[in-house]
Image: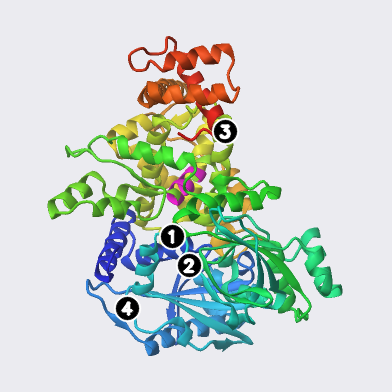
Amino acid sequence: MLNLKECLDNFALEVNSHADDTGSLKEDSFFECFTNYLIESGELDTADRCYFVKKGMKIDGYGGDPIDSDNVLNIIVCDYSNSGEIENVYKGDIETVCKRATNFISKCLSSSFLRELDNSSPEYGFADMIRIRWDLIAKVRVIFITNKSLSIRKAEFEPIPVNGIKAEFVCWDINRLQQYINSGKEREEISIDLPEYGGSISALQAFASDSPFKSYLCIMPGKTLAEIYDKWGNRLLEKNVRVFLQAKGKVNKGIRETIEKEPNMFFGYNNGITATASDIEYVITKHGVAISKLIDFQIVNGGQTTASIYDAKRRGTNLDSVNVQMKLSVVEEEISKEIVPNISQFANSQNKVSAADFFSNHPFHVVVEDFSRRIIAPPKKGTTQQTRWFYERARGQYAEAKSQSTSNSEKKKFDAIHPRSQLVTKTDLALVMNTFRGFPHIVSKGAQKSFTNFSSEVQKTWKEDEEKHVKFNEQFFVSSMCKVLIFRSLEKLISQQEWYQGGYRRNIVTYALSKLMQILTAKGKRINYPKIWAQQYLPEEMNEFLIDLSFKAYEHLIDPPSGMPLNITEYAKREECWELFKKIELFLPTGSSTFLISKSKEKEIIKEGEKKQEFLNEVDLQKQVIDYGGPFWAKVLEFSSQNNLLTQRDWSLLNSATAIPRKLPSFDRDYKMLMNLLERARKKGFNK
């Protein structure tokens, strides 16, 4: 657990490292690093940098297009300190900064203000988007982020009216960041005192005494659900579950008509919602259980129902007669990581939502993590220090690993072997891999949407490779880390160019590299990842070509055609933007042989990687069978015989396995068969 000063120091190191690695200003890196936590916690879906300051106005960024976040306009303002000490920030200072942000919003509704702005600037695009979307915006949130210490909480700030809409303030200071990081959770806990939203809810116990968690069937008043959603929005919905929040389509049309025409039948007609909590507070009344508090509350199925009821509230529909059935599972924190994913997956089975869409404990992430702890990268030019690329599949793994070092010398050794510049999170990997797969418009939509898209592809490939498990091998890991290296190197190169005026860097990088892959595919060429891995840097000829591609991408992005958004960030998210860029004809430079290989050579490398992985899998399997030992296999034989699970051949094989390690199986295939027999026994109840 980090104390406040340790949290401040670690975060400062993260900001400084990002600034050094990308060539960014520290203020820009602060925005990037802090908003990554906000996205991870569920506070935002995405965060786009847009720094603008003028007398009486200031903003630092925004949370994407409001129509992608349930018509909520999220404005981000920063208060960054370069001091190494904990500084205080006061209520009056925050109110002043936030008022300047709402002044900017008001100005955006004036066409004369837009004429004052440079129409190629990020602030012009954002202001134009506010003007266009204003009639659809239901809520304004000003999110204040700072590495200073705030002595008051967000509840003490009064909303400010902005052209008929109240703007609420959300504050994230170093204290709140520390609490979130120390929680070890992938999203910030939501605790709901139900009396604040209309009163306790009735529930019926629905669990056996030996159940690993407690389940309740509840009646949630529609007004209560709408008020809760009004307060917490999409953060109520299990973070990566794919849901449709707009009140559109046949399903939501039916929900809406029931609310409006037959509200008293809503409970009977609607399937209700499925939710989880880590704990509840309740009392027993003569009518049964009355739940008054939901701790760490999440809706894992029923996003359409929830959003439709909220939409009805927003349109002024009377919800007094609307009641919603809710299946609530109260799962203790210790077992939540195992059980909640299954609740989410099975509750959403009608939408075919895969486990890879949700969670960091999918086997793919475990495999990549394992490679990252074992594979050593060659020394960089001019050094003798070997390093590792550290894959962080779950937040906090890097800091936890470093904390195992007790002395300063051990910490320095850890930093030397695991430089922060070679830390790769699962969302980092998704952004990079989607870029090299040719999806720059999806990368431009932000980390979460990119991760969901990449997860679907991983799940598909994993299933296809289920028998052999050879595709995600050492060669895959090495080429993936090379792609990260290329992506990050280009970020830094772009920052050094005279034509780069700030903003849109990630969009430029992803479009340039996606274009590179398109060109290489057309020419039957591939990047020489083994060479890049051996050198741990990019050949100069490759750098020069990437800079040229980046300038072409920059020119394309800042000149959207008629009918496309004037906001460059939003234009980059359109598939049409990518399709237009694909049509631009570009050619490989004469020196490209220094960083390219043929398509056939790459196939040869991939095949060698799969063959090596197949051998390693066989070795691991044999080791596992031998490590179980003869007495264990004797128990498997006894259980399987008693339950009539064996053929004569199966019996003979298991009987011979009881002699391990004195006598080993005769054939390679026997090891796999033994593991299959063990799996069969476990499915029937064997648990030794």
| Start-end of magenta stretch | 427-434
* Residue placed under numbered mark 2 in the picture: 189
- Residue 56: x and y in percent read 45, 87
- Name which residue lies at 38% across and 15% down: 659
Distance from label 2 to label 1 (Cα)? 8 Å
Q: Secondary structure at mark 3?
A: helix
- Residue 428: x and y in percent read 43, 50
Distance from label 4 to label 1 (Cα)? 22 Å
* Residue placed under numbered mark 3 in the picture: 683
Tell me which label, 2 or 4, sits earlier in the chain.
4
- Residue 578: x and y in percent read 59, 49
Query: How many numbered marks does the figure carry?
Result: 4
* Residue placed under numbered mark 1 in the picture: 185
Q: Which of the labelled discs sits on residue 500, or is there none?
A: none
The three-letter amino acid code for the residue at tag 3 is Lys
Label 4 neighbour load within 10 Å: few <14, some 14-19, many 20+: some
The three-letter amino acid code for the residue at tag 2 is Glu
Q: Which of the labelled discs sits on residue 149, or is there none?
A: 4
